[in-house]
Amino acid sequence: MTAKVFVTLKKAVLDPQGKAVQRALEKLGFPEASDVRVGRFIEITLAAASKDVAARRVDDMCKKLLANTVIEEYRFEIAE
Amino acid sequence: MTAKVFVTLKKAVLDPQGKAVQRALEKLGFPEASDVRVGRFIEITLAAASKDVAARRVDDMCKKLLANTVIEEYRFEIAE
Amino acid sequence: MRIAILQFPGSNCDDDAMHVLTRVLTESASFVWHKQSRLPDATDAVIVPGGFSYGDYLRSGAMAAHSPIMDAVRSFAADGGPVLGICNGFQILCEAGLLPGALARNASLHFECRQVNVRVEGKPTPFTSAIPAGRVLRMPIAHGDGRYVHDDADGLGKQGQVVFRYCDAAGGIKDDANPNGSQLNIAGVSNPAGNVVALMPHPERASEALLGEEGGRQIFESLRMSLGQGAGSARRG
Amino acid sequence: MSAAPEPEVTRAVGRAHGLTDDEFDRMLSILERTPTFTELGLFMSMWSEHCSYKSSRIHLRNLPTTGPRVVHGPGENAGVIDIGDGQVAVFKMESHNHPSFVEPYQGAATGVGGILRDVFTMGARPIANLNALRFGPPSHPRTPYLVAGVVSGIGGYGNSVGVPTVGGNVAFDACYAGNILVNAFTLGIAQKDRIFLGRAAGVGNSILYFGAKTGRDGIHGASLLASAEFDDSSEEKRPTVQVGDPFTEKLLLEASLELMAVPGLLVGIQDMGAAGLTSSSVEMAARAGNGVDMDLDLVPRREPGMSAYEVMLSESQERMLAVVEKGREPEALRILEKWDLDAAFIGTVTNTARVVIRSNGKLVADVPADPLAEGLKYDRPRARPTDLDALTAVDPLALAQPRPDELGATLLKILASPNVASKEWVYRQYDHMVRLGTVVGPGEADAAVIRVQRPDGTWKGLGLVVDCNAGFCYLDPYEGARLAIAENARNLAVTGCKPLAVTDCLNFASPERPETMWQFAEAIRGIADACTALGTPVVSGNVSFYNETEGKGIHPTPMVAMVGEIADPAKAVTQNFKGEGDVVALLGRQTDELGGSEYLKVIHGQVAGKTPRLDIDLEKRVQGLCLELADRRLLRSAHDLSEGGLAVAAAECCVAGSLSVGAVLELPQAAVPELAQLFGEAPSRVLISFAPANQAAVAAAAEAAGAGIELLGRTGGRSLRLGRHVDLPLETLSHAWRTGFAALLG
Ligand SMILES: Nc1ncnc2c1ncn2[C@@H]1O[C@H](COP(=O)(O)OP(=O)(O)O)[C@@H](O)[C@H]1O
Ligand SMILES: [Mg+2]
């Protein structure tokens, strides 16, 4: 099974990187990009008895290691 | 519209960060995670006449700035 | 010689390059702001200094590579003008496509600031022509993204484009002399013509006895010699 | 921009915002009416412990703060001392303890950002950073995470801005497990005649906001978090974590210096630190005896719907407030545009001495600046901790002792312990060389030395060091604080730098406990006495109270940083033995003191016994001698004895350099037990080495100085022999010392 985890800064938290990328896109001729947020994308290959079990385990991994829940939030998808 | 862009190192390029995360997961009691790759996840809010137009523009953004195609590959999804 | 030192928002070794060129080598040099679209007249060589252009956000060097001044650097290089990238300058030149390969996160995943040894090799370049091949220079590194990656690193070496490799004090290319996991210990490369050169270590930090090491100064002295021989002015017609 | 109507302000609301009923009444009598909600926010933050120093002020005034070199002492954004040639050094230290415990990377990063702004806001270009860190035991489950986060946060910020981190200090103790310390120091250089102060001078001048946009970051952050202890409810009070943006900071730094370089353009300037726009505007107005009138609708914002209260209290990072000469606004904007920074003129300087705030076309605050800035002053009760007698009654020599054949193993254990082992793992992550100033960097000597160019092109040097042995302070805060000052000065002197001035960061537990206030007052007394004796005034500093978790306070930790000077930086002395055949000698006097030592901590797991006594007269003689020997270039190496005593110092001299050098040394002749000879931590001692040809000169100088010198032996060989029982191969010593730190942190 594979899990795709998306970790992003919480909305209220400043994202200096996103801000800099947005400005750079604007200068490069992409003024239509009005907001950019930069996060992490983590792909995990894992063994699990079922998708449900995998989801529980990945949620745990996010809380314990993959996301810093003080400033970040996460979402994930599990695929066979 | 929003675009979600996923940038990852090409398979052939060593991903020490992924390796480190995998080892850390193992130590934390997640031996089932056999392989981990860490990439970037970029969310863009953008204005575009249609999804097709947006896709063309975002592809351009990736080529020009968001990914370094010498070592990275990218994928994206557009949502209204 | 007249050197143009580029300044991007976030450059922080620009003053250091200026100091070594003007105070240590007593040459003339001027800063060129990233928003400018041309280099000063009669520029003999360009230095892309170290630092954290655009905070190293997204990827080190990615945003600076698109600055207006980089078009001018591109045509200067195409005419054979000597261009030296140091640390972040190396990353910028790779991102701008002026040099092959890319610089990825250090294998240690840490920023590394310490002295290293590099061996000079490859084809002659304006920055190394006065340094005998095989000589070991001691210089510091200070970077988080210095792992050189190229899909044919071997081929690059065969073409003579590998200019510096991390080595031990005796010049041996050893794994434990490699501070960041670079392929084949590559610390610096050149373009096929040899006039664009960049390296991760900081020669400007190893150019004065008071600061400990002086090996890096040979790179700037080499430039002076090659310009003196007219190599640098050949590009201007 | 629609904000919810402001809540009505009652005593209960005041209490919820940290104002006692007395404080609330005081506010009412100042205003002569019920405050608006925004006004409550101003009082609450300006009267917080962090901003008002209400518990510490009556003690701080006992510190010596003047001297021939002092240009600006405490009270400005940073201290300023004269370093000759029309140049000044501007420096300060600040704590960012609580934020770093909540989010180690961002907390440490924004701590560095804040102290950098304190220094460049005065017109100085920052040229060096130091950091002092305290963590719980390495074995504590959260410690490795906190260490990794804090260290990469400090590096991530300082490296990016391009200011070298040239030294620091890391130690571990159980008392910090729930309350780490992150103290950051910055030093900058300015022209003496171009120092900028935080003053809103000149009625009619314009108030300029520039830098990052304002968001809801850290509302109540410094003011609340640093002013109340941690407990479960701080989870809810937890503000939005401030995220550092070193890239914007670098632009802010360059833009500020460029604005300041234009003659007459800036009248005053101050960074927006703790309590953001509130403290910067109130303090600038009060210092100038003026008022300000500001319209918050003009403040650049990151989020919609922020209330006036939120805008005034936001602690968004990388923002500055400046007063621009009337009529020259466009000049300022042009410079800020060059640097792609947000900027707006948000108000004017008035002659009312009141802070007037408007929002949405309404008046939301109108308060006198002075009483807000003046704050409160408490003389809190003090009491000596009752457990001190028992702790200091412990006789280290009465505890089980290692057998003679175990002394080598004991040394190795201490060398590999977290407080003593090499900190290379830490400082390798810091760019300690950028700006080409670092003549002596981290790990090379007891102090760092950076060079500063004189107007004529020649170089002079500044020495920098930060240190504090909190165990000593716990057992005796007066003596411990004196020792901290003495050790800092000694570290400078052995490196060849004459000590000039001090900045401090006084980290203590809750001031509401009499024991804390006793410790605090004792520590201040100790700092004051030692600084007076050594001629090193305190020119800036910071107090951090409430360093405790669930009623358990940290050891008193009066962190001290000191700045010194060396006329010719090429004469700086480093600590490692330089080659074979040199003579090794020990300066100072031996004692049998082992109280508070690393030996006790590592071998017996105790912080106990009597803090070693400082003989300030001997200390001055030893330091004077070190300075003289360095200046006459008679030394090959010098290293002061601190944690781990003679044995650790000797081992470090052998293995700290890039080449290891062995030595064969006798123990000093003194009638002192071997254990104390090896591991005792009596102050005022320095291990030196010199060429045999210089022996007569060194001995004569020591004699003349009355410093005490004893020849111990010679360098050479591939092992360290120290007395009759310690004989260890260099590889073994080196391995223990070099790998200890990383090994402990897993
Ligand atoms: N947090 C830190 N940042 C930078 N350098 C550090 C840090 N901690 C320790 N160092 C450096 O490591 C060396 C040894 O530190 P320390 O053990 O405190 O010295 P000493 O025993 O002489 O007081 C010093 O050069 C110091 O500057
Ligand atoms: Mg010391």
Image (cartoon, coloured by chain):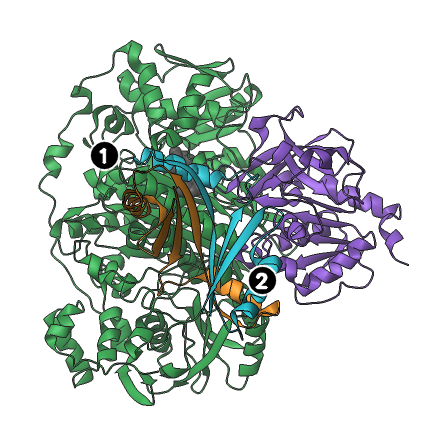
Chain colours: A orange, B cyan, C purple, D green
Q: Position of residue D278 (x, y in %)?
A: 32, 73
Q: Residue B61 — which label? A: 2
Q: Is residue D60 above or below residue D641?
A: below
Horizontal side, residue C62 vs residue D253: left or right? right
Q: Position of residue B75 (x, y in %)?
A: 52, 54
From this viewpoint, is residue D168 visible? Answer: no
Horizontal side, residue A19 vs residue C51: left or right? left
Q: Distance from label 2 to label 1 (Cα)?
A: 64 Å
Q: Position of residue C208 (x, y in %)?
A: 66, 41
Q: Amino acid at mark 1?
A: Thr
Specify the subunit that label 1 lies on. D
**Closest to the observer, D715 or D81:** D715
Q: Helix or strand or loop: what does disc 1 sit on? A: loop
Q: Quadrant of the C terminus of chain D?
A: top left
Residue picked out by circle 1: D611
Horizontal side, residue D438 vs residue D708: left or right? right
Q: Quadrant of the N terminus of chain D?
A: bottom left
